[in-house]
Image (tube, rainbow, N blue to C red):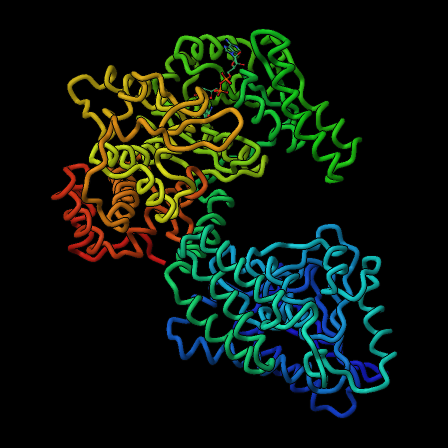
Amino acid sequence: MINYELDANGIATLTWDMPGRSQNVINGESCAALFAAIDKAVSTPEVKAILMTSGKADFIAGGDLEWLLTATQAAELFERTMSLHHALRKLETCGKPVAMALPGMTLGGGLEIALAGHYRVASDNPKARFGLPEVTLGLLPGGGGTQRLPRLIGIQNALPLLAEGKKLKAADALKLGILNAIVPAGTEIQTARQWLLSQTAPVQQPWDTKGYKIPGGAVLSPAIQQLFMAGNAMLRAKTWGNYPAPANILSCVYEGLITDIDTGLKTEARYFTSTVLSPEAKNMIGTLFFSMGEANKLAARPKDVPVQKYSKIGVLGAGMMGAGIAYMIAKANITAVLIDTSIDAAERGKDYSKKLLDKQVQRGQISQEKADAFLARIMTATEYSTLDGAEMVIEAVFEDRAIKADVTRKSEAVLNADAIFASNTSTLPITGLAQASARPANFIGLHFFSPVDKMPLVEVIIGQATSDATLARSLDFIKAVGMTPIVVNDARGFYTSRVFSTSVLEGVKMLSEGVAPALIENAGLKAGMPVGALTMTDEVSAELVYKIDKQARADLGAAYVEPAGMKAIQKLVELGRIGKKAGKGFYDYPENGKKFLWPGLTELFPVAAQQPAIEELVERIIAIQSLETARCMEEGVLTTARDADVGSILGWGFPPFRGGTISQIHSTGIAAFVAQCNALAAKHGERFRPTATLQKMAADGTQFYTR
Ligand code: NAD
């Protein structure tokens, strides 16, 4: 785990090198090895100095989350945490100089261990990042990070790193004083040795030195008091109290830095324990780390299909979606052929990439040369013959069956027999679109989200005739462009659009019940949604929601059931208040000013004298989404809880602290969720009636997740 070597100069080198793993992590085994190595180095008189480094490309990747979640008892977790604190305190207070030689990534627990050294030297590695990103998984740094970092670089500099999980490049970490030096790759150990040999007197951490003052001001200084007041308010505005981790981080810094370091570490261990055991952390780790990791590793990929490499992909339609898709293809070093009805339209689509690249060049994120080469990978055309040799074509033309059928036939006339034809339709069932194809086994849905370069999800839709090979090779494409797939079966609205629309319509339905518009919006935010239902409707446009419903009405005939909230949508459309793009919807959008709720709204939907509690509205907004997801599972639209959870967070911003639509049911408890839905159904209608499978699961105790 940790190799221990003592040289003739009295330097003990502790090299982390966990066998059978590509990364070093902090877990039970490595902690035991670390504690033993520290004991030995500290207590051996021949050891004059201590150097810690890694035998891997990176230093330590952080805590092993699987191991972390094995602790279910607060007392056990607290003791575990305190034993790491004791060991690191022993190391930094032993008087012998301690240097950390950091070859690459030094994140989370890795940086916390590095902070227990007296000197940190990093390799000049462009891939290396330094930071404490625990908060992004609903955790807080539990290895002393909330105590050592602000004591080292000041509270004001440390808070964004701790509470937002910002990761720094080496040069920025050096500027802040987190690193002492950056040296050419491969010389960091040598530099650390030189520093150790140059130390003649016993070495202490600044915070163990007499007269130590926190750089930039103590907790109770006026400037830092103001910082905490503003910080608290900003956090509250952003999170609505839904995320314990960042609030606990602020508390750790505030309470811990008023006291000495040992008391501070104990304070951190208490907050860490309660944060790890919170449902929010379990939900976020479960979905954002484990499920997302599985999705990115293509867990749904049929085996035994050779991996498809891509060199050329056609994109039909250079509008908003096509332009973004072409950008992602070129970014992955693949040639994109962008086709539209006129070369001007195709060039406009290519301009989208040019604009993004120009910005990156300006910011110094990419060289002009690389940007030029990137852009040269996007070819524009009107002729389908340019698709010759493409392994895949993605169509993003108008949402019109006839146009889509036409471009399918034109493409297939040129493409090789095994090329994949993918549709980016947002509403049209894939099986129907595949009827235009001469080889429906190669036809698949790849539903991207807007803006494509910012939204990492692709909803893969399997049509009735789609082959396993087409699915496998399409997933290879998604991996190649660095996006995250979920796989669903063909159905109206697929998964994401179908469930997302229930949350919007539930909010709009509240309007017709007399709920005050501002209360509806705040309930959405308090539930943890990115925006309220009325804002969201304005963004996507009431007209589009109405149009999709009209199509469903026509397609379904007698089986059609009008969704809750649709009458209110219709009223707005009839008034021409179709949304943000028209400058008027539920809100008014003045040309030079902030949007505000349309005053006429309360005439159209009179506000009831008695308003419901916000908690009841939150419950409805969340339960309707989880319930519709359970229906998707029952109908086989979704086949795994993993895809449901990942798709809901990445696709439409379902609150991450809830872990996704299914994790929400899981953490509520299935029986409790069924009871909640039954109560809502009694009050608000049959749309809340729990499914047969849910009722059965509640009765027999089965779960969506086994982990
Ligand atoms: P858009 O109107 O911005 O772009 C469509 C482009 O297709 C236009 O440039 C048009 O000139 C071109 N086009 C039309 N007919 C063509 C033909 N026969 N051959 C080649 N090009 C043709 O539309 P968009 O928002 O980019 O949407 C495109 C598709 O993606 C639609 O199916 C839509 O439902 C789907 N989609 C849209 C979103 C979204 O948020 N806008 C999200 C997911 C999926």
Q: Looking at the image, which is closer to me, 242 or 117?
A: 242
Residue 502 screen position, x and y as percent: 29, 35
Q: Is residue 9 above or below residue 639?
A: below
The residue sitting at 19% across, 45% down in the picture is 693
Q: Position of residue 57 (x, y in %)?
A: 70, 58
Residue extending farthest to the left is: 682
* Quadrant of the drawing holding the N terminus: bottom right
Query: Compared to 406, does 123 lie above or below?
Result: below
What residue appears at the point 58 percent right and 9 percent down from the top-left corner? 384
The number of numbered badges drawn on the structure is 0
Is 395 rendered above or below residue 150? Answer: above
When the figure is inspected, residue 19 is found, relative to residue 610, above or below; the finding is below
Is 11 situated left or right of 425 in this image? right
Residue closer to the observer: 372 or 24: 372
Residue 479 in view, yes or no: yes
| Rendering coords of residue 558 (x, y %) | 15, 19
Position of the C terminus by quadrant: bottom left
x then y, percent, for residue 197: 86, 79
Answer yes or no: is residue 442 visible.
Answer: no
Name of the residue lying farthest toward the bottom: 45
Of 474 and 276, nearer the camera is 276
Residue at 72% across / 83% down in the picture? 211
